[in-house]
Image: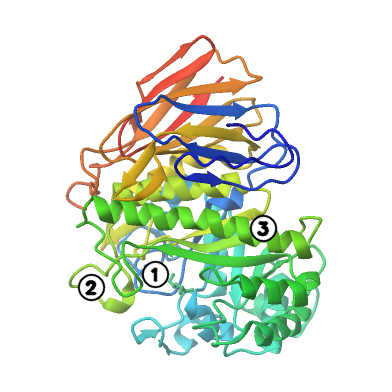
Amino acid sequence: MLCRDSVCRFVLMGLIVLFGLNGSVCLASTEITSEANNVNKLIIHTEAGKDTISPEIYGHFAEHLGRCIYGGFWVGEDSPIPNTRGIRNDVVEALKKINVPVIRWPGGCFADEYHWKDGIGLPQQRPSTVNSHWGMVTENNRFGTHEYMDLCEMLGCQAYISGNVGSGTPEEMHDWVEYMTFGGKSQMADLRRANGREQPWKVKYFAVGNENWGCGGNMTPEYYADLYKRFATYIRNYPGNNITKVACGPGWDDYKWFEVLLSSAAKSMDAISLHHYVFEGDWNHKGKATVFDEQGWFNTLKKTFFLDKMIVEIKKIMDKYDKEGRIGLFVDEWGTWWDVEEGENPGFLYQQNTLRDAVVAGCFLNIFNQHCDRVRMANIAQTCNVLQAMVLTKGEKMIVTPTYYIFEMYKVHQGAKYLPSDIVCNPYKSGSETLPSITASASKDKSGKIHISICNLNPEAPAELECSLEGFKVQKVTGRVLTADVMNAHNTFEEPDAVRPAEFKGIEIKDGKILATIPSKSVVVLAAE
Ligand code: AHR
């Protein structure tokens, strides 16, 4: 069922997941047939695209938490582990291959306890502080503003800094921005020069606090909205730098928070955030990363899909207060959250990463693409050794995770034109609950090539897919697939290549359509020209 009118039609055959409607063509629709055994259909409207997929949807997040910064990115100049000015070469090389567009730093909950002046100046003179949110460990502040900006320069990515509202002051936030971005003569700019950096940096994104409803100060939305306006006033755009100011949003379906923030402070924000973590059970029973059954697989995907529902609701509120669509929705923390691996510090959030995490990531990224008219940034939590990581390190060893490969396969969508699509697919059922068995999103890059990312959620059954590219004569199609024999397949330091993408062979072109057999529990990316 297609959505070619200004109003999408909802047809309830099984469960229907329906995405935004803004303009004459729906960005995406999914219809689930009531019975299985049908050929799944994907119809891509190749001439209907009007939105660009912001590269920042493929963004990352690195917090002073566990071994994300220390041991993950940072080993210090004197380490035997190969590094450049203290930053691990292997990690930088791996991340360059996935085109990291932005890294959010220094937190997370750490951000509202962080006082940036602790992290500048001579290393031996930097104070020791306590990371009281994450494991009560001593923070020696060796990785600070200069080191973070150096990392961004090495990766060629944008900076996204979370400022301290919870325990900081407007003056402290103002000074940080002046320190980093003012090129003229001033006390802060001179301090930066004295610390070895002559030219100001570019800082494109700056958040006014993090989770200020919780670890960032336990505030009500009304109180935070007033504080937001106060702090945001002093985040200045110095010549040559233009900051996207980000207001804190909720971490669950708290639509009231959006109403209050947007009704009170829409004019002074450029983006508002949302966090969404998924697990098998509830917050206190998250489940294990590598030990789970099909119910655990299903539950996690169900929670992933809930994000789509939330975004649909949030967009309605944003459309009410921001009719021009100026304000972006930044899902600046997302991903799986499992029980900490045995033997690890409980405050360090170290977890393994399996094929399940990869399929979850593929579904999340398809949802972001489908909502790219509003979702302009998303940051998976977190880059190294914490939660749904890209890379895991152990001393001098480093491995990449199945989730890393999803970012590598999907990087073709970065900056491409989003192509609306409709799916009619078989149900993926668990008891009385139903999910679509297939999710997909498509884009056209600058060279005219079309990329289609497809996830088969069903861990038992392959999916026959018939893909029509309306308005496009497909002459050649190639593909890559990420899958494994078992749901919990993962890479280890002993077996680092257990899960990695392979050439996808199950495709042909027939009568102008692409026919493909998408393996069970897999993510496929096709390139059509
Ligand atoms: O990513 C881990 C934590 O999750 C972040 O510090 C916080 O913002 C969120 O609750």
Q: Quadrant of ligand 1?
A: bottom left
Please, what secondary structure does the residue beneath circle 1 have? loop
- Residue occupying the far top of the picture: 511
| Residue depicted at x 59% and y 34% | 421
| Tags 1 and 2 touching, CB below 8 Å | no
Q: Earlier in the sequence, mark 3 or mark 2?
A: 3
Q: Residue at x 26, y 65 (%)?
A: 287
Residue at point 78% right, 65% down?
Answer: 321
Q: CA distance from mark 3 to mark 2?
A: 40 Å
Residue type (three-letter) at the residue carrying disc 3: Lys
Q: Which mark is residue 315?
A: 3
- Mark 1 or mark 2, which has the lower sequence index? 1
Q: Point out the tag, 3 or 1, that comes first from the N-terminus.
A: 1
**Above-or-below relation of 272 to 232:** above
Say which mark, if any, is on residue 283: none
Q: Is 331 displayed left or right of 178 in the figure?
A: left
Residue 332 shows in the view: yes
**Gap in Å between the C-alphas at discs 3 and 1?**
44 Å
